[in-house]
Amino acid sequence: MDKIIVVGPASQMLGMNLYRELKLASENDSLITCINTETKTFPDGENYLRLNIDDETLIEGKEVIIIQSTGPSSDGDQNSRIFELFMMVDAVKRMGSSKIIIVIPYLAYARQDKIFRPGESQFANVILRIINSLQIDELYVVDVHAPGVLKELIVNKVVNIDSMKVLADHVKSLGAKDIVVVSPDNGAIERSKAFAKHFGEDVPVEFFEKKRDVKTGEILMQGQLTLKNKDVVIADDIIATGGTMATAIKLSRESGANKIFAVATHALLLQQARFRILNAGADYIIGTDSIDNEVSKVSLAKAISDYLK
Ligand code: R5P
C-alpha cells in the first residue's frame, strides 16, 4: 500500500532519515512519498500549519505517517508543537487518509503524570485523552517519561520505543571502557540496569539518591560511589535544565570517575544546560534526534522504521 510520510516542523532531520530508512526497507520505494509542512504564527499568537501540497487527492486512501516531536526549541514551544501535530492529523483526516500513524518521539507533559502538590492537574493524562479524540490508528513514542500514562490511550496500537541500544552503541563507538552505568536517581535504576546490559552482562550499575523540592524544583543529590578509573555513563530519559545531570557528574568526578558520558534520550538542553553539564566535568553530551540540536548524535530513524516498515 502507498505510504505518505508527513515530516512535522519539529522533526525535520529525524523525519527525513525515517523517510530514507522506510524507502530502503521497501520493495518499491516509489510507493513512499514525503511531504513537508509550512507553519507560521498569526499576529494574535495562534498557530497555523498547512501540508506543502497542491493536490489534496494525494492523501486520499493512503496510509499516512506523521512524525512530530513535541519538545521546546528556539522556533516553537511544546504547546505550538502539539497544536501543529493536531493540525496535521486533522488535515490528513479531512483529505481522506485511510490510516493515520503518529510518531511523537518526545512526548511533552509526560512528567506531569502524578499529583505532586494539592490543586494540580494530572495533565499527562489529559494530553493522552486529547490524542484519543483524534481517532488515529497507531501511536509510537520513544522512552516516554512514565510509561504508565500510556494506559490512558484508546488507540489500536501503542508502542513505546526503546532507544537504549542505539545510545549504548554510540557510547561504545567512542571507546568507553571499564564502564559503570550511573543512575542519577533511584527511580531510574531499573532503566539504568536495562541500559547497562547493552554494555555487557556484568557491567555494574550505581545510583545517587536524588530529591527534588516540588515547590522550588531544587535538586538535592548525594552519594559516594566507587568509580576510580572507571568510565562512567550517566543515563537519564530527559535532560531539561541539566541540573540533575550536572549534579550527578560532579558527584561522579568526586568519586574518581575517568571519562564521563552524559546520555539522554531527550536532550532538551534548556537555559544553560550545556554549560552546566560541561562545567561539571562531562566529556560528552549525547542525545538522540528526538530533539533536533547539536548533541543529537544518535538517530532513532532505524529503530522507528523497524516498527513501521
Ligand atoms: C526526572 O524525573 C527526569 O527523569 C529527569 O531527571 C529530569 O527531567 C531532568 O531535569 P533537569 O535537567 O532540569 O534536572
Image (cartoon, rainbow, N blue to C red):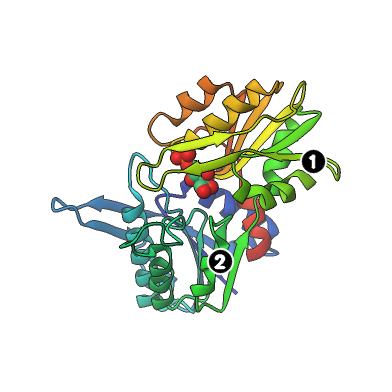
**Residue nearer the viewer, 190 or 176:** 190
Q: Quadrant of residue 185?
A: top right
Within 8 Å of ligand 1, the CB of disc 2? Answer: no
What kind of element bears circle 1? loop
Identify the residue shown where x is 38% and y is 46%: 72
Q: CA distance from mark 1 to mark 2?
A: 27 Å
User: Which numbered disc flags the more N-terminal residue, 1 or 2?
Assistant: 2
| Quadrant of image for the N terminus | bottom right
- Select label 1 or label 2 by which is in front: 2
Left or right of 271 on screen, residue 140: right
The residue pinned by badge 1 equals 199
> How many other residues sit within 10 Å of disc 2, few (<14), some (14-19) or many (≥20)?
few
Q: Nearer the viewer, residue 98 or 293?
A: 293
Mark 1: amino acid:
Phe
State whether residue 135 is above or below residue 68. Answer: below
Secondary structure, mark 2, is helix
Spot occupied by residue 49 in the image (x, y as percentages of width and height): 30, 58
Residue 148's disc is: 2
